[in-house]
Amino acid sequence: MSSAATDVAFACESVRKEFGSGPESRGVLELSLSVAAGEFLTIVGGSGVGKTTFLRVLGGLTPCTAGSVSHKGRPVAGPPDGVVMVFQDYGRSLLPWRTVEKNVALGLEGGDVATAERQRRIDDALGRVGLLDSRRQYPWQLSGGMQQRLQIARALAVEPDALLMDEPFGSLDAITKASLQDELLKLHAASQKTIVFVTHDVDEAIYLGDRVVVLAGRPAGISREFDVSLPRPREQLETRELSEFLELRHEVHLAMGHA
Amino acid sequence: MDAGDQSAAVAAQPGLLLRVARQAGRRTNFYGFATIAALVLLWQVVIATGVVDVEFMATPTEIAGAIGDLAASGELATNVVHTLSAVLIGWAIAVVAGVAIGTLVGLSATARDYSMATIDLLRALPTIALVPPAVLAFGFALKMEVAVIVCAAVWPVVINTAGGITQVPRELRDVARTFQLSPLRTAFGVVLPAALPTVIVGMRLAMSLALILAVVAEMIGNPAGLGYAMVFAQQAINPPEMFAYVVVIGLLGVLLNLALGAASRLLPPVAAAALAERERR
């Protein structure tokens, strides 16, 4: 690996998150973790374990109670530059009164991107997710898979270093899910962006990730970590039939407490 | 907004508006109109034949004749203009003030904590009771009617604006945060447009309240406009003319509501919400 690839994107040291305050407070998260730049890290855990909370802490949407979180060496206090979150509920995350194209433009309205450059980035992002022909449509006219593609395009348009994805394919059907997984892998291979991807789907976590972290317990901590050395590019059929894939699948399920 | 943004917005508009117009055409309910026509016919027959014994009454044809006479003399137009200006001025002030207060209350938990008790107290007051004090404060004048309308119509706007803002999905606020939009851009570009369909509900409630209060203020306060003309016709024992004003006030309410509904669908968030709702079915 080159030295650039081993740079640290996110570093969490003794991060603790509590909900409530005083004697009523309860710890929901307690962990240390670092994510390398360009890494595709997947986080699995049962529902309600604190995966989303952890992702929100990384994205600066929720402050942690104790410990430190940094992105590229700078402490995270609020959403860091170059980090964008993709939400699970695409229906509630897109602006229904804006066309596909104008939804993608949203992320560029905060910065000082010139008009021509803005249009280039919108076209580029829509092209990457295959939505150029739908640019004048409204989100509610699109299928669920296309809406989630749109949310990904909107994130890509700001050209972030890191994407934080919260169960983005959780509510899609199996076929749509598989094609979006492959598109995301292609995107990662082409751009080497850091991706932290939360899911409750063990197979998805192994199929996508360079490394799988299992969150469990209360407060949630890292119960186990697995390096995934499956060959890339990954293939929906071949990769999932490899004995290494099946062994990992077995181990991850055990780590999650599935007997 | 730069030129590129605007041209994209303009290019996107016709699609949405055209769809709204088509939906409106398809929505016309002919069976509903048939029921109304049948009821008017029934009224005509019952009164003209004298089946039902009432002291003073008018048939639909007599009422239509009275409306024609009032229109020809110019009396109707004068009264409509007076009442309509009170309604529109009062409603406009209520909307501006209500959206401003509602936005503040919706966005700030502190403002909510301090103001909700006062708002709940004030909006629970029976608004008709405001007319006598308003007459003392402002005299028999248009501004008395406007004051009464504003005091009553501002609350639905405040409540619906604040409620609409607090009900904006958390995801949308998070989206604004993850893209690091400024507070102003978040408020005007994300939160307020998302709350707009609910704000419009408040504006429509305010419009019907405004008409009711204008008429009441004219009946028991300011001797002018449709409300006063109606009471005057009643005291002159002129049922056709009295009913003519009842009908005109009713029609005015229907037209104001329709106009506001149509105007609100020109706003992309309202049009999108309405169409998205319909496509979901």
Image (tube, rainbow, N blue to C red):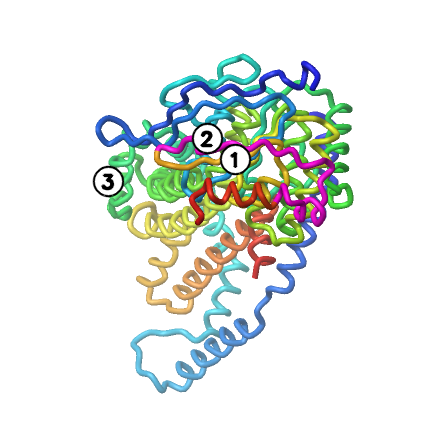
Percent position (x, y) of residue B136? 25, 37
The secondary structure type at the circle numbered 2 is helix
Disc number for residue B121? 3
Q: Residue at x 52, y 24 (%)?
A: B184
Respond whether the residues carrying marks 1 and 3 are from the same subunit. Answer: no
Crowdedness of circle 1 by 10 Å Cα count: few (<14), some, many (20+)?
many
Identify the secondary structure beneath mark 3: helix
Residue A102 belongs to magenta span: no
Q: Is B239 rendered above or below residue A65?
A: below
- Which residue is at the front of the view, B265 or B148? B265
Residue B106, given in percent of the width and then of the height, sits at: 39, 34
Q: Chain of mark 3?
A: B
Spatial CA span between label 1 and label 3: 51 Å
**Looking at the image, residue A42 lies above or below residue A113:** below
| Amino acid type assigned to the residue bearing label 1 in the image | Ile
Secondary element type, mark 1: strand
Q: Amino acid at mark 3?
A: Leu
Q: Residues within 10 Å of mark 3 (few under 14, many from 20)?
A: few
**Marks 2 and 1 close (CB-CB < 8 Å):** yes
> Label 3 vs label 2: CA separation?
43 Å
In the rendered structure, the answer to whether residue A103 lies left or right of residue B277 reads: right
Q: Which residue is mark 1?
A: A43
